[in-house]
Amino acid sequence: MLKMNHSFMFIKEKKVMFKPADITQTLQAIPWFLDLKPYQLERLSKVANFQKADACEELFHEGAKEDDLYILLEGQVNIWVHVPSRGSVCVFTAEPLDILGWSTLTPVVRQRTATAKTTCPSTLLCFDGEQLRHLCDEDHDIGYLIMRRVSNVVASRLLTTRLQLFDIIVDKSRFPTQME
């Protein structure tokens, strides 16, 4: 679990506004960003905010327009997909430092591929998708590092989802369905 200084300036729409130094310190503690230079971390911190979410709060919904990329800092988030004739199926449980909302960085698919719902109070580092895409285009070193990391997440999630969906075909009773 990451240790953070929670002395925020104000709360607006559950996005907690920290001093940029707090965000930069958090970025420095995330293994994803170890290869970035201090000025690049500073640039990334300008497109990020902390977000608090209550238990059972939906972060985004499958099919909705994309907007933010999240890194889970504290808590847990279930990822659900709709399976025809089965309803909503939980295909992944995100733990701290997992990435959520990666579809915001895809060049063509601009909609959510799943629904994300917290299982307990959670804290997330939230990147504005449009600003992050612009930053990745401007600074190719940041863009390459982020896209390389995201491609690993996508490949891992696709494999996990594929295996779980095969299991559903074999044994329909093993997986929880319908978001509670």
Image: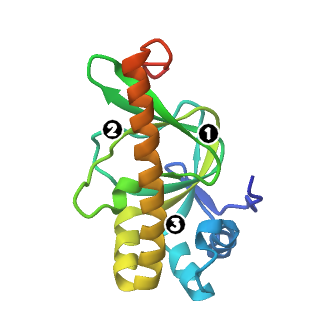
Alpha-carbon span between mark 2 and mark 3: 23 Å
Query: Would you place residue 149 above or below residue 51 in this image?
Result: below
Q: Which residue is at a point 60% across and 86% down the rendered structure image?
A: 37
Q: Which residue is mark 3?
A: 48
Q: Earlier in the sequence, mark 2 or mark 3?
A: 3
Which amino acid does the dot numbered 1 rest on? Gln
Q: Nearer the viewer, residue 151 or 11?
A: 151
Mark 2, secondary structure of its residue: loop
Q: Nearer the viewer, residue 57 or 30?
A: 30
Q: Which residue is at a point 62% across and 54% down the rendered structure image?
A: 97
x, y percent for residue 72? 59, 51
**Of all residues shown, which one is farthest toward the top?**
173
Q: Earlier in the sequence, mark 1 or mark 2?
A: 2
For residue 76, the mark is 1
Mark 3, secondary structure of its residue: strand
For residue 62, the mark is 2
For residue 6, the mark is none
Q: Is residue 101 visible?
A: no
Q: Residues within 10 Å of mark 3 (few under 14, many from 20)?
A: many
x, y percent for residue 138? 36, 84
**Is residue 85 found left or right of 61 in the rendered image?**
left
Q: Which residue is at a point 39% across and 37% down the rendered structure image?
A: 162
Which amino acid does the dot numbered 3 rest on? Ala
Mark 1, secondary structure of its residue: loop
x, y percent for residue 28? 67, 73
Say which of marks 1 and 3 sits in front: 1
Q: Earlier in the sequence, mark 1 or mark 3?
A: 3
